[in-house]
Image (tube, rainbow, N blue to C red):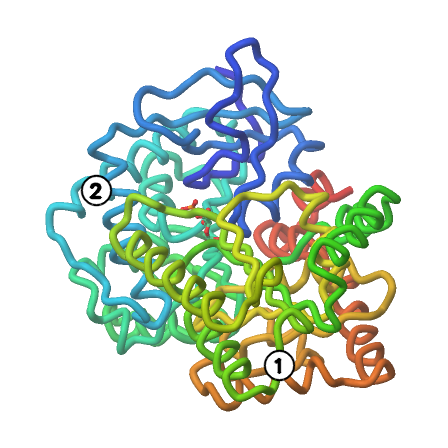
Amino acid sequence: MRQSSLVVVANRLPIDDNAPPDGVCEWRRSPGGLVGALHDILAHTPATWVGWAGGAGPAPELPDIGRLRIHAVGLSEAELADYYEGFANSTLWPLYHDAVEQPVFDRSWWEAYQQANRRFADAAAEVAEPGAAVWVQDYHLQLVPAMLRERRPDLLIGFFLHVPFPPPELFMQLPRRTELLRGMLGADLVGFQRAQGAHNLAQLARRLLGAKATDRAIELDGRTVRTGAFPVSIDVAEMQSLAARPDVVRRARQIRADLGQPRHVLLSVDRLDYTKGIEHRLTAYSELLRDGDVKAPDTVLVQVAVPSRERVGHYRLLRDRIEREVGRINGEYGRVGGPAIHYLNQRFDRAELAALYLAADVLVVTPLRDGMNLVAKEYVAARTDGDGALVLSEFAGAAVELDEAFLVNPHDLDDLKATLLAAMDASAAERSARMAAMRRQVTRHDIRAFTRAYLRSLDDSGALAASVTG
Ligand code: G6P
C-alpha cells in the first residue's frame, strides 16, 4: 500500500462514479461545495483522497489524478440507505440546518453510521504514512477523528465541518450526541465556517463532557483540541478565466437572446435542497408578478435546481412541490414562448455556469440556512466586468464576508420582495461599488487562502501548508 503525508477523508471522491474502466477518468465537480473547493489544489499535491465513489458495492480501483491518489471506500446498498441517506442526510443534515425539515431519529441507522465511519477510518489509517496529517471532512464522518486517533496516535488529525454547527438547543436533541461530540474531538483542530460553530462546540463540550472549553480550545482527556473559523472559498482564478473565455462571453449573450432580451435576468443556482429556500423565493417572485411589480418576460427568473439525494423522501417531496409551483406560476404569468420562470433540473458544466453568471443581472441566493454558499462567491468571481447584483440570505455563511451584497431575511417575504426590487433597480454606480467591495474580499480570500489558513493552524511549522499551496 502506497502511503501519503497528507490524507483527505471525505464522504465523496472528487471523480465521477461512471468513470470508464479504461482508466480515463474525469473530475467530478460535485454540486456541493466540498469537492469543488478542494480538488484543484490537491491535483498538484502528493496526497491521497479517501472517499466513496458513488453507487453501491465494493470499492472500485481508481487511477491517480495528477499527483493525487484516489482511494475508494465501498458502501453496500444497506449502508447507503442507513448511513448516507439515513443518519447523515435525514438526521444530521436537517438538524444542523436549523431543523427546517424535521430530522428523523431512526435507531437502526446509528449502527450503519458507526460502521461506515469505521471503514473510512481504517482506510485512512492504512494510507497515512507515519506522522502524516489527515484532514477529515464534514458531517458524514464525525466519528472518524476519534476512531483514527485510536488506531494511529502518531497522526496529526484535522476535522472541518462544511455545514453549520447548531446551537446546543438543537444538538441536544440528537440521541447519540455524546458519541458524536467525542468523535469530532478526536481531532487536533476542529474547523468551522463561522465563529458561531466554535462557540456552540465549546458550550456543548462543557455541558455534555464537563470539559474546560473556550471558543478557541477544548481540554479533554489530557489533550487540547483547538477550534476556529475558516470560511471556505472558491478557485477565483479558475472562475475568472472561465468568465473571460470568448466562447463563454458569447454564450452569455446567447442566453440573454434565448431568454428574449429581458430587462432583468434573475438567476438562482442551487442543489435541489430544502435548505436553499427555493419555495420561499418562488412565492416572493410570484407575488411580485401578481402585484404587477415585475412582468414576464420583461423580467425572468432562471432557476437551476441541480438534482440531489433523490432517494431521500424530503427531497422527492420538495421536487414535486417546486415543479408544481413553477408550473402554476408559468401557467398564470407566462405567455407563449415567454415563461416567467425558466426551470432547469439539471447539472451544468463549469463553463455553462460561468455564462449564466455573466448573463444574470441579479443572482438570488436565499437559503434558509447554509454553511457557506459558494455559488455566491462564484458569481462575484465571474463578474470581472464589475457589474451584477447579489441578493444574499443573512443565513448563509457567505453573508459574513459578503456584507456588501443586498442582504435579506428569506423568511420575511416582504423583505425578500423589497430586496429583489432594490437589487433590480440599483443604479450602475451602486452595483459597481458593491461588486468592487465583494470582489476585493473574494479575491483576497480564495480557496488557496482557506487551505493555507487551515493547514497552518493544524501544523504550525507551516510545512504542511507550504507543501499544498506553494
Ligand atoms: C454539501 C455538503 C457536502 C456534500 C454536498 C453534496 O455541500 O456539505 O459534504 O458533498 O453537499 O451533497 P452529496 O450528498 O451529493 O454529497
Which amino acid lies under the numbered mark 2 shown in the image of this protein? Asp
378 or 149, which is in the foreground? Answer: 378
Query: Which quadrant of the rendered structure holds the C terminus?
Result: top right
Residue 82, numbered circle: 2
151 up-or-down from 445: above or below: above
Name the residue type under label 1.
Val
Please name whichever residue, 63 or 227, is drawn nearer the observer in this view of the structure.
63
Question: Where residue 179 sits in the image (x, y, percent)?
Answer: 23, 55
Name which of mark 2 and mark 1 comes first in the sequence: 2
Q: Name the outermost residue toward the front.
A: 336
Could you tell me which secondary element the residue under label 2 belongs to?
helix
Which mark, by number, is residue 12?
none
Looking at the image, do the residues carrying marks 2 and 1 touch, with CB atoms under 8 Å apart? no
Instruction: Spot the residue most to the top.
Output: 22
Residue behind mark 1: 294
The percent position of residue 432, horizontal first and vertical second, equals 84, 77
Q: Which residue is at the front of the view, 36 or 384?
A: 384
